Amino acid sequence: MKIISDIQELRDHLRGQNRASFVPTMGNLHEGHLSLMRIARQHGDPVVASIFVNRLQFGPNEDFDSYPRTMQADIKKLEKEGVYILFAPTENDLYPQPQEYRVDPPEQLGDILEGKFRPGFFNGVCTVVLKLFSCVQPKVAVFGKKDYQQFMILRQMVRQFALPVEILPGETIRAEDGLALSSRNGYLSIEERTEAPNLLKALQDIRNKVIELQERNINTLTSLEQAAMKFLSERGWNPDYIAIRLQRNLAPPTNANLEANEPLVVLTAAKIGKTRLIDNLEI
Ligand code: AMP
C-alpha cells in the first residue's frame, strides 16, 4: 500500500486510472470501515482510502483534539484489505489556506436532526468530501448508513453538482450486542458500554411498534418518539432526538405519507456520560 499525503503526488499515482473506488474516513478503523473497503473493492480498482480528521466538521466544544488517532494500526488493517493507496493528508496538505469556499447543504436536509444539534457539521463534511473527490477523482465512493443523514446529503450533493461519482451505501456493522461500531465507542466506560446497546433497543422498540400499529398517524408516531426519549432519559441518557422520518428525504411524515405506506427510518442521537452516540433503523 502506498501512503501519500501530498495532493500532487496522489494525482501522479492515480493518473490514467478511471475506475478508482474511494472510502473516506477519519481513521481509528473498525470493522464498519473495513466493510466499506470490501464494497469498494467489488466496485472499482484501485481502492483508495483516506484518513483525515477534518477540523471543519467539529464544533468548538467537540472532540477534535481528543479524536482517536491510530495511524499505525489503521495502516495494518488497510493493507490486509488490499487497499492500494492510503491518502493521509496533513491539515497543511488539504487546507494550505483557510478553507473559505464551502459547500452549504440546503436547510431542509442540512439543518435538521444532526445539523440542528451540530451547526456547521454538514457544511464541514460536504466541503471536505468535495475536496477529497477532487483529489482522488473516484468513479465510486462508499459511505456507511450508520451516518444516514450524511449519506443522503452527500448523495444529493453529488447529484446537484453532477459530480461523476457513484455513491454506494454500506450497511451498519454492529457489535454482537447490537451497538453500532463507532470510533467514539472507545470513550465509553465499562458501565456505559454495558448500557450502550439500549440505544438500538429504543429504535427496535419503535420499529416493532410502528409495524404493529393498526393505524399509523402523526400523533401515534409522536407518542412513540416521546416514549423512547423517556425510556432513554430514565436510564440516564441525555437524548438529543429520536425522530421517525421519511427515508427518501428525512422530512417528518404527513398523514398522507403514512397512508401511502412510504418507507420510514427512525434516527437518534443521545449522550451517555460525555459520549454522544448516533444510530438509526429503517422501518
Ligand atoms: P468516520 O471515520 O466515522 O468518518 O466514518 C467513515 C465512514 O465509515 C463513513 O462513511 C461512516 O458512515 C462509515 N461507518 C462508520 N461506522 C460504521 C459502521 N458501524 N458500519 C458501517 N459504516 C460505518
Image (cartoon, grey):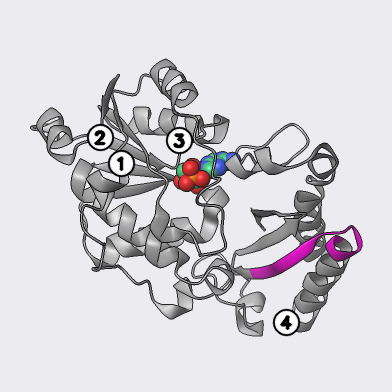
Q: Which residues are magenta?
A: 232-244
Image depth: mark 1 or mark 3 in front? 1
Mark 4 touches mark 1? (CB < 8 Å) = no
Mark 1 touches mark 3? (CB < 8 Å) = no
Of 39 and 100, which appears nearest the observer?
A: 100
Q: Amino acid at mark 1?
A: Thr
Q: Is mark 3 within 8 Å of ligand 1?
A: yes
The percent position of residue 277, horizontal first and vertical second, equals 67, 53
Is residue 101 visible to us here?
yes
Image depth: mark 4 or mark 2 in front? 2
Q: Amino acid at mark 3?
A: Leu
Residue 5's tag is 2
Q: Is mark 4 within 8 Å of ligand 1?
A: no
Q: Give the side of residue 122 with respect to residue 253, left or right.
A: left
Q: Amino acid at mark 4?
A: Ile
Furthest residue in direction right, as rendered: 234
